[in-house]
Amino acid sequence: MAERLKLKALDAEDLAVVSAAMQDALVAVKDIGWFRDENRLALVASRFRWEAPAGPAGEFSRTHAALVFDDVRDLKQRNLPLAERDRLLDLLSVRLDAESGDKHIVLDFAGDRAMRLEVGRLVCRLEDLGEPWPTWCKPSHPGDPEAWR
């Protein structure tokens, strides 16, 4: 049984760790839920396991993970294809909005898509669900040394 990641973020430094763990997670639009009455946003994603070493045959792994934000007062979105429930979104980062400090959390997705959460305070949880599965596809980014080849 693979070790499961379980993190909690209460400040900017903690959130940076969560962001690194969630970078390149794939999220279906239908797997994002805002529970307004509970002041909670939750999503389930296919998380690339950056912290896990490659397997013996060079394979990498992904796992399902739940990302939950509590004390969410309002939610805004930019360019999210909400009507396309099966559309996969590529999560690039989770960060505090530089202009509002710890009052807004921004989830940046590829394709100039984003969600901005207005929060009373930063309370975030990330937890892996189930067992990981192998993948041969390792995400890369233009600034990565591996992308220069």
Image (cartoon, helix red, strand yellow):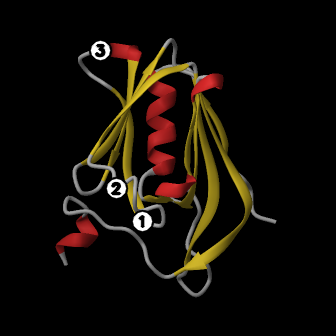
Name the residue at 17% across, 72% down: 148
Q: Are marks 1 and 3 in contact (CB under 8 Å)?
A: no
Question: Image quadrant for the C terminus?
Answer: bottom left
Nearer-the-camera pick, 134 or 37:
37
Q: Are marks 2 and 1 in contact (CB under 8 Å)?
A: yes
Three-letter code for the amino acid on which mark 2 is drawn? Pro
From the image, tell me which residue sits under label 2. 81
Question: Where does residue 11 sit, x and y in percent of width and height?
Answer: 49, 19
**10 Å neighbourhood of mark 3: few (<14), some, or many (≥20)?**
few
Q: Residue furthest right?
A: 1
Marking on residue 100 = 3
Name the residue at 65% across, 24% down: 38
Marking on residue 87 = 1
Question: Image quadrant for the N terminus?
Answer: bottom right
Q: Is residue 50 above or below residue 113?
A: below
Three-letter code for the amino acid on which mark 1 is drawn? Arg
Instruction: Give the mark, 2 or 3, whose residue is nearer the N terminus.
Output: 2
Identify the element where label 1 is drawn. Answer: loop
